[in-house]
Image: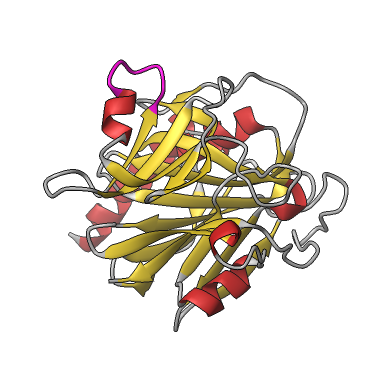
Amino acid sequence: MIRYSTHIISILLGLFALFYPASTVQAREQWKILAKGMEYCVFHVSPPPETGNGKIHIVRVDTAQAKLRLLLASEHNKKARTTAKWCKDFNLVIAINAGMFQQDYLTNVGYLRNGFYIQNKRWSSKYKSVLAFDPKKNGLPTVIMVDLEEPDAMKKLGDYNAVVQNLRLMKGNGINVWEKSEKRWSEAAVGTDDQGRVLFLFCALPYPMWEFNEAVKSFGLGVTRMMHMEGGPTASLSIRSREVNVDLAGSFETAVGPDETSSELSPIPNVIGVQMK
């Protein structure tokens, strides 16, 4: 019976390889528990790139069990910090860019509100994706990401204390909205999945964004929406837990090595962090 089952499994695997070639199968490591409601996994893009490992680091957060925080240098002595320093100073398990910033090195490029404090009151017509969390009343989802062209988008956003507008990568139902282009960069992104969880994503190896989006979709994570948080050298992700201690920094297109190492973390003015409740 054991031999027969093994033979059947071999046939099924052969059929799978025939109809689903290796280039479509995405390898990944095991999910690691960082803390309650937080887990981390490294996916490997397939086929692998000519240089580097093609790793995409993903943190998945259940905000019913973990707390998101929007932390801004403009509210904390106007002091930019690396994501590692944001983690240390504010007892965060995870920190990622909250978005691109203006030339004053403080202000988000899109609309940003943190409670009663409005850092940027201007809604950009170029940025169609908005992340909101920390609801003002009970019974609402703990976090939402909306497409601004939705008729009730502004009404939904008004129910949340933390609101951040950024450049869109995927709109509702996981639709890739990026046009094909040869331009590429290291990427820090935030998304939501079909179970209402938040995804923090980071890729040090510079990729065209259309390809990055398609790779993420192929992982089977149920991504519903995704926004660009930062690209290039200032793209950052830090993790601090008993099992994982990671600092990831972006690079210029030509600066990444074969092992995808790059320069040290850059100080950034605004981050989204995750704490244990």
| Side of 38 relative to 58 (left or right) | left
Asked whether residue 220 appears in the rendered view, the answer is: no
Q: Tell me if residue 149 is in the magenta stretch.
A: yes
Tell me residue 219's x, y (percent): 45, 43
Tell me residue 102's x, y (percent): 70, 42
> Which residue is drawn at the image coordinates 39% and 56% (left, top)?
60
| Side of 240 relative to 157 (left or right) | right
Asked whether residue 124 appears in the rendered view, the answer is: yes
| Side of 240 relative to 153 (left or right) | right
| Side of 72 relative to 233 (left or right) | left
Determine the residue located farthest toward the bottom in the rendered image: 242
How many numbered dots are placed on residues in this image?
0
Find residue 270 and report its image quarter.
bottom right
> Which residue is drawn at the image coordinates 61% and 28% (left, top)?
210
Residue closer to the observer: 220 or 152: 152
Find residue 237 and report its image quarter.
bottom right
Q: How is the image coloured?
A: secondary structure
Determine the residue located farthest toward the front in the rendered image: 116
- Quarter of the figure with the N terminus: bottom left
> Which residue is drawn at the image coordinates 35% and 58% (left, top)?
61
Q: Tell me if residue 271 is in the magenta stretch.
A: no
Determine the residue located farthest toward the left in the rendered image: 139
Tell me residue 266's x, y (percent): 74, 62
Tell me residue 269's x, y (percent): 64, 57
Determine the residue located farthest toward the right in the rendered image: 254
> Which residue is drawn at the image coordinates 21% and 44% (left, top)?
141
Q: Which residues are magenta?
A: 147-152
Identify the main secondary structure in magenta: loop
- Quarter of the figure with the C terminus: bottom left
